[in-house]
């Protein structure tokens, strides 16, 4: 459970990172860790000094628990124990009643069980004295839902608030859908909840939940032309307010922030927002999660104007940051570790493995993204390990 790439503390500089780059990134844990999310809590965060530090969690599929916690301690990631047991946000025997127990997805009835009994993409937002977990789970009808829970300590009791009523229907995405086994206009899954904030002209902070419409799960053949179609996968922006009891109130209809194009190989997902030097950036992944097609992009973002522009590829399977040993880098999360410097956590496949023949063997690794050069000057964000990769 050790890694030679230790999560940096808040005093790291770009020079520190460059001086200690490994040739090949090592996994944070020798365990399956899809959609890794890392969070830094401080002594002033909910939970106080007892829970200060770095925490890690990941997607949990087809298990009697969900979202086990790992803590960075003594230079390595270790399971966080509570009463002698590995602590999970949703322990065995305490899963929400609305979660599915094997009911099939009506749009994709042939999915393997690990994608059917799905508890995906946990992320924790720290705001107004609360920890809010945003996550994805299927309901009793097999439909993917964006849900949330709240707590006052990360390893404490979590109150599940259920899913948000934000799913769309097929014909909202694809008006030409001819209907299918699930009906003429079925509900489409909603996944990957991520919270971002922006300050408006009046100095008011406004919060937005970004979710992905899981349209890639819906494919059909045009009855006239015989052409195959796949629904798009827009990322939606939902402005919201969170009440003192943790409940979320949506403020108006959702807006399409960005949608996938032909070069995204059928989908975009795993969105995450960083803001530096007055500019927000949207990170997201594209392609099939289960092999070397998966990769991650970065684009400039204006949340208030609902605008995404200047997209470019950040990391793909051929990137030297992966040391020639890993592929399919995606679904990143970030922790700020210095001025204009972030640790980026994402999942990868070891070369020679993929989902179709090996099942889910994704591992979590750490890279870095910098918004400053070595002289401390503001610059376009770049992948540190790519620019300063040690020779093979």
Image (tube, rainbow, N blue to C red):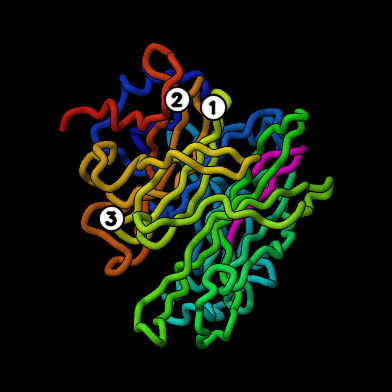
Q: Mark 1 points at which residue?
A: 276
Q: Position of residue 339 (x, y in %)?
A: 51, 20
As rendered, which of 390 and 88 lies closer to the eye?
390
Instruction: Indicate which label's residue lies in the foreground, 3 or 2.
Output: 2
Could you tell me how many numbered marks the image carries? 3
Question: What crowding class fits label 3: few (fewer than 14 Cα within 10 Å), some (14-19), or many (20 or more)?
Answer: many
The answer for how far apart the CA atoms under marks 1 and 3 are is 30 Å
Question: The magenta stretch spans which residues?
Answer: 125-136
Question: What crowding class fits label 2: few (fewer than 14 Cα within 10 Å), some (14-19), or many (20 or more)?
Answer: many
Q: Residue furthest top?
A: 375
Q: Is residue 107 left or right of residue 42?
A: left
Q: Name the residue under label 2.
A: 371
The answer for how far apart the CA atoms under marks 3 and 2 are is 27 Å
The C terminus: image quadrant: top left
- Dot 1: what SS? strand
Q: Residue furthest left?
A: 392
Instruction: State if disc 1 and disc 2 touch (CB < 8 Å).
Output: yes
Q: Mark 3 points at which residue?
A: 292
């Amino acid at each position: 459970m050790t890694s030679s790439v230790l999560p940096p503390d808040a005093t790291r500089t770009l020079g520190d990172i460059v001086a200690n780059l490994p040739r090949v990134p090592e996994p944070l844990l020798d365990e399956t860790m899809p959609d890794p999310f890392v969070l830094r809590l401080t002594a002033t965060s909910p939970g106080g000094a007892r829970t200060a530090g770095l925490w890690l969690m990941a997607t949990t599929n087809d298990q009697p628990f969900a979202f086990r916690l790992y803590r960075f301690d003594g230079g390595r990631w270790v399971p966080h124990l509570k009463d002698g047991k590995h602590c999970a946000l949703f322990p065995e025997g305490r899963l929400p009643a609305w979660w599915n127990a094997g009911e099939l997805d009506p749009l994709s009835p042939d999915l393997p069980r690990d994608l059917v009994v799905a508890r995906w993409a946990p992320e924790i937002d720290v705001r107004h004295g609360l920890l809010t977990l945003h996550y994805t789970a299927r309901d009793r009808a097999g439909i993917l839902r964006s849900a949330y829970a709240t707590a006052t300590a990360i390893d404490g009791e979590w109150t599940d608030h259920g899913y948000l009523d934000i799913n769309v229907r097929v014909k909202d995405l694809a008006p030409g859908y001819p209907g299918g086994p699930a009906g003429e206009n079925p509900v489409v899954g909603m996944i990957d909840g991520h919270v971002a904030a922006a300050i408006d002209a009046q100095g008011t902070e406004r919060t937005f939940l970004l979710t992905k419409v899981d349209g890639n799960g819906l494919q059909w053949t045009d009855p006239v032309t015989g052409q195959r179609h796949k629904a798009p996968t827009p990322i939606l922006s939902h402005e919201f307010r969170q009440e003192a009891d943790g409940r979320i109130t949506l403020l108006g209809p959702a807006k399409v922030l960005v949608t996938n194009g032909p070069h995204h190989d059928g989908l975009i997902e795993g969105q995450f927002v960083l803001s530096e030097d007055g500019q927000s950036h949207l990170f997201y992944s594209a392609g099939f999660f289960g092999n070397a097609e998966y990769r991650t992009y970065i684009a400039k973002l204006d949340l208030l104007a609902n605008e995404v522009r200047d997209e470019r590829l950040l990391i793909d399977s051929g990137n030297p940051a992966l040391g020639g040993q890993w592929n399919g880098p995606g679904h990143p999360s970030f922790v700020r570790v210095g001025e204009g410097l972030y640790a980026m956590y994402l999942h990868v496949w070891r070369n020679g493995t993929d989902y179709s023949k090996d099942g889910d063997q994704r591992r979590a690794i750490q890279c870095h993204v910098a918004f400053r050069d070595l002289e401390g000057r503001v610059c376009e964000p770049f992948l540190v390990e790519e620019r300063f990769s040690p020779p093979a």
